[in-house]
Image: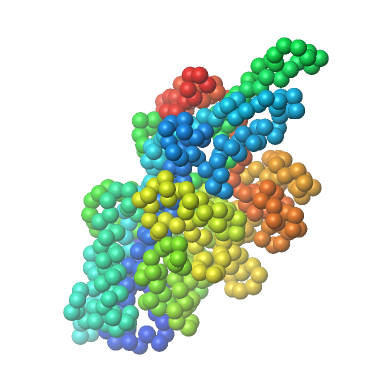
């Protein structure tokens, strides 16, 4: 079955744009087609620029975290002045050693030193670009450019950066009146022009994909020399233990294509996994064909319709009631950084402006998101402060080129002094706790409750709260949470970071994954079929050293 074709200028798209007009401005805009046309362009360009700056900031942060993971674990083993740090900005090596030492019996712990404990990092020295490929895409937004005649307004669908308002035209002058001067128009034109000309590595992206042939794992070896029981004389017996494990983590997104040849640094071949804009080809934008250049996104695994379906276009209630002001995207004039609001979602600059609520509702996770990503319901309260501290004191020293715009930010919907989380996104969009329901109840792909984000290994339950660390794979508890920590917990739990769980759920499921023990034989096997497709097999590119 072929997806339906979306024709530029269909009423479903035009109605939404036409509705983005604050009532007190409508009479002015309707006086001339040109004034309305300039508004269409300004709104489309604002959305485009806001998306770019949000994703490029987060992508650079991902690269910085990957660079940290490539540092030596045991200190200066590679002549580096840096070591891998954990989220608390503490030595990963020291934390692993402390865990090892605390689990030794009194006999085994006698005489054990740091030199008896070694850790191997599988991606030490690897550049992030060698195992994390940014999926750069090529897309635009098509807007309705209107020109007037004696009897009517003529409508033409154009790329937003191929037909910018020109100085001296009626379109330009009317737009300047609406937005309060020419300065903001020129600023936005310059932003859009710069984005279009960005070099590889700084272009539009829909995330990163991980190279399966570069495997993330750690090796640990430990040596003790305990005395034999009832043998007080002579030296101890040397005991050595060695193990490999893939550390705690989670999904970071799907491949773009369903196959990944071992010789390639990106997915290639097979079927498309992500329904999205075309991969960047370095060419100029061609015809205004939305099937090629419009920002299509899958809403559930296997989705081949994306935003082209009627259901997707009707996924939010009462879209004709959306109201906005041309200056709702004030972020464009206040760059991202540690001392700014870091809020790219539309503001409420005028009474009656409500586009922000609809943007937050559209951002709430769907089935595609929870399938391919590990989503933290309560990231801001649980992890953000630690990540910001790690950025300031460690990540920025690893890569001095990092700009302040990469400073870690909260989930979309947050602004200065207003905490916001993915959990709140879902609750707001679904009307949980009061307020209107913005998600169309007939749309099946939206996540209905925050606990549905908890799709991985879980704790043993509230009864185990004094022995946190016991995990069980209980399918009955996936997508279930009887109590989030943000809902209020006993002080001994809420204030103890050792008794927290990824996913912010005190009694129920969790997000992310636990440590997985792997066999050294598997890591050294030369016929692994991990790239998808027939005949696409071979060894990983970073096997353990021979002496491991």
* Quarter location, residue 331: bottom left
Which residue in the rendered view is the most extreme toward the left? 168
How many numbered discs sit on the rendered protein? 0
Which residue in the rendered view is the most extreme toward the right? 230
* Quarter location, residue 38: bottom left
Which is nearer the eye, 477 or 60?
60
Up/down of 141 relative to 277, above or below? below
x and y percent of residue 385 in the render? 55, 57
Is residue 351 left or right of 33 when viewed as pictured?
A: right
Which is nearer the eye, 288 or 400?
400
Residue at x-position 52% and y-position 33%: 74
* Quarter location, residue 489: bottom right
x and y percent of residue 100 in the render? 65, 32
Up/down of 319 relative to 527, above or below? below
Asked if residue 305 can be seen in this view, the reply is: no
x and y percent of residue 425 in the render? 56, 64
Q: How is the image coloured?
A: rainbow
Residue at x-position 29% and y-position 48%: 200
Is residue 479 left or right of 227 when viewed as pictured?
A: left
Residue at x-position 58% and y-position 40%: 248
Residue at x-position 37% and y-position 49%: 400
Asked if residue 151 can be seen in this view, the reply is: yes
x and y percent of residue 272 in the render? 41, 44
Is residue 245 left or right of 408 when viewed as pictured?
A: right
Up/down of 387 relative to 436, above or below? above
Which residue in the rendered view is the most extreme toward the front? 233
Which is nearer the eye, 404 or 18?
404
């Amino acid at each position: 079955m072929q997806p339906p074709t979306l024709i530029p200028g269909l009423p479903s798209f035009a109605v939404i744009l036409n509705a983005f007009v604050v009532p007190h401005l409508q009479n002015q805009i309707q006086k001339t087609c040109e004034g309305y046309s300039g508004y269409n362009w300004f709104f489309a360009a604002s959305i485009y620029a806001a998306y770019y700056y949000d994703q490029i900031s987060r992508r650079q942060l991902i690269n910085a975290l990957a660079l940290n993971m490539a540092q030596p674990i045991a200190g200066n083993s590679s002549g580096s002045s840096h070591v891998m740090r954990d989220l608390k900005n503490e030595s990963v090596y020291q934390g692993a050693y402390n865990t090892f030492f605390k689990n030794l019996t009194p006999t085994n712990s006698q005489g054990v030193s740091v030199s008896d404990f070694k850790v191997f990092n599988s991606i030490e020295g690897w550049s992030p670009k060698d195992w994390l490929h940014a999926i750069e895409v090529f897309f635009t937004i098509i807007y309705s450019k209107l020109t007037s005649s004696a009897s009517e307004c003529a409508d033409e669908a154009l790329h937003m950066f191929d037909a910018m308002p020109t100085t001296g035209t009626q379109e330009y002058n009317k737009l300047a009146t609406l937005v309060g001067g020419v300065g903001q128009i020129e600023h936005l034109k310059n932003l859009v022009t710069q984005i279009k000309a960005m070099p590889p590595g700084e272009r539009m992206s829909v995330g990163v994909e991980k190279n399966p042939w570069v495997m993330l794992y750690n090796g640990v070896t430990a040596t003790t020399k305990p005395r034999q029981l009832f043998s007080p004389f002579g030296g101890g017996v040397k005991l050595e233990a060695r193990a490999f494990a893939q550390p705690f983590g989670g999904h970071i997104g799907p491949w773009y294509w369903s196959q990944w040849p071992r010789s390639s640094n990106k997915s290639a071949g097979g079927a498309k996994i992500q329904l999205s804009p075309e991969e960047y080809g370095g060419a100029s934008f061609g015809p205004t064909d939305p099937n090629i250049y419009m920002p299509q996104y899958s809403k559930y695994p296997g989705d081949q319709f994306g935003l082209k379906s009627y259901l997707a276009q009707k996924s939010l209630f009462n879209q004709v009631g959306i109201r906005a002001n041309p200056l709702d995207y004030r972020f464009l004039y206040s760059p991202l950084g540690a001392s700014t609001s870091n809020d790219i979602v539309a503001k409420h600059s005028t009474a009656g402006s409500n586009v922000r609520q609809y943007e937050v509702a559209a951002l709430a996770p769907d089935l595609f998101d929870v399938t391919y990503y590990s989503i933290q319901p309560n990231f801001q309260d649980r992890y953000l402060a630690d990540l910001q501290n790690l950025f300031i004191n460690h990540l920025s020293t690893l890569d001095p080129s990092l700009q302040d715009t990469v400073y870690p930010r909260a989930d979309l919907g947050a602004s200065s002094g207003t905490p916001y989380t993915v959990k709140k996104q879902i609750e707001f969009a679904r009307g949980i706790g009061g307020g209107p329901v913005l998600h169309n109840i007939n749309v099946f792909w939206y996540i209905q409750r925050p606990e549905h984000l908890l799709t991985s290994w879980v704790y043993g339950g509230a009864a185990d709260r004094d022995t946190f660390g016991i995990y069980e794979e209980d399918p009955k508890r996936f997508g279930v949470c009887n109590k989030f920590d943000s809902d209020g917990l006993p002080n001994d739990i809420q204030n103890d970071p050792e008794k927290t769980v990824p996913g912010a759920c005190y009694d129920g499921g969790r997000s992310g994954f636990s440590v997985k023990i792997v066999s050294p034989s598997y890591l050294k096997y030369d016929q692994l079929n991990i790239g998808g497709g027939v005949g696409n097999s071979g060894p990983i590119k970073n096997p353990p050293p021979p002496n491991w």
